[in-house]
Image: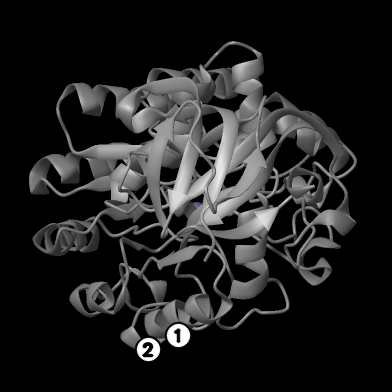
Amino acid sequence: MADILLRGGRVIDPARNLDVTADVLLQDGKVARIEAGIAAGAAKVIDVKGMWVVPGFIDLHCHLREPGQEYKENIATGTAAAAAGGFTAVCAMPNTVPPNDNRAITELMVRRAQEVGMVRVYPIGCITQGQKGENLAEMGELQDAGCVAVSDDGRSVMNSEVMRRALEYARGLGLVVIQHAEDVSLSANGPAHEGAASTRIGLRCQPSAAESAMVARDLELVALTGARYHVAHVSCAETVRLVREAKRRGLPVTCEVTPHHLTLTDEACAGYDTSTRVNPPLRSAADLAAVREGLADGTIDAVATDHAPHSPIEKDVEFEQAASGMIGLETALPLCLDLVATKKMTPLALMDRMSTAPAKILGLPGGTLAPGSIADVTVVDPEAVWTCEAGRFRSRSHNSPFIGRSLRGRAMLTVVGGKIVFAEEKLLG
Ligand SMILES: [Zn+2]
């Protein structure tokens, strides 16, 4: 593979608190040097003036649908979407068909990702067998086969005793437990957030307490067990407050927020567009402000897409019948850049939440441009304005409420282990 010299970009490395204009030389799959005026030698030179050179984004939470639902997405299309969005690594949730609760499924996912050769794929294994919330999955076997964490995402571990044992077992293995926090007796599969908008438009709804009550219970179990706990897709002010307090108490807790919970409120559901049906649901303006604040002050550690592809079979139906989820890998960056445009976050802080922090949470390679580290690098044009169009998605599914919208900011180049896996034509000239 050819060496690459990224010439004259704004180099942002949150792992070293670095934000300078310099050249970046990628050599033999590693970051070799960061300096001004590096001689090109035999390297392929790419002019990135006016752009950011950052450690590749790492998504802690996406659904690649393989095995079992390849009509929605597969590992090839999902990782192509990831690369186009600037991601160099993604964690694949275990609610495949069948669920990833055993070695064979994990190994299949790892093998497929290697064959495809786009971005790194880290499977997440189930907490419980078949995600049924009853008997623990063989976490040691899952870890051995390549799983980097456990979660029953899509479902909450409702039984407190099962959750306690899961935390204890995972702790022994050094695995993080990722909880889709939802008290299902309280949420009752409500498709919308309980608030003024749902009342007005007449949708069944679930209160934000369905999430925060589950997080409150879990935090007590974390205090009891000392296990590493991560809250998936935080959506409401109460959860942000609980996590903030738990961190103050010194509990080993981290959490993530999706780009859509950072940018849309329950008002987006007013037109009954089924692509706005997500779980947890889009919340109130106060919740939106709280998660933005939480991400800015570091209470929320990471941005994670919860990229959830669905076909028209699941989405061209009544709002109440529609499956939950929207795709997100290819729109995450411009949505999050709004926090920089509105001066809520510095570029350095946002890149931390999209790369350095996720790497740290699961102990993954990447998340830094330090010389000697793997060459997982993304080049961002923060000012590129483009229209989000269905035909442009690499994802096999098009369930996005952002279609037709003008967005600002794009990944221009994505490099994984020194190999270019995505490039905008005009950048390579
Ligand atoms: Zn979930």
106 displayed left or right of 165: right
Is residue 158 or residue 299 the one in the foreground? 299
Quick check: can you spot residue 327?
no
Q: Quadrant of residue 160?
A: bottom left
Mark 2 → mark 1, Cα distance in angstroms? 6 Å
Give the x, y percent position of residue 227. 15, 49
Residue 372 in the image: above or below residue 95: above
Quick check: can you spot residue 144?
yes
Residue 110 in the image: above or below residue 41: below
Q: Residues within 10 Å of mark 1 (few under 14, many from 20)?
A: some
From the image, tell me which residue sits under label 1: 108
Q: Amino acid at mark 1?
A: Leu
State yes or no: discs 2 and 1 in contact (Cβ < 8 Å): yes
Q: Which mark is residue 394?
A: none
Give the x, y percent position of residue 165. 15, 62
422 displayed left or right of 360: right
Q: Is the distance from the Cβ of mark 2 to the nearest ligand 1 atom less than 8 Å?
A: no
276 displayed left or right of 39: right
Q: Quadrant of residue 378?
A: top right
Badge 2 element = helix
From the image, tell me which residue sits under label 2: 104
Q: Amino acid at mark 2?
A: Ala
Give the x, y percent position of residue 348. 46, 23
Residue 290 in the image: above or below residue 366: above
Give the x, y percent position of residue 177. 28, 55
Residue at x 18%, y 75% (from the top left corner)? 140
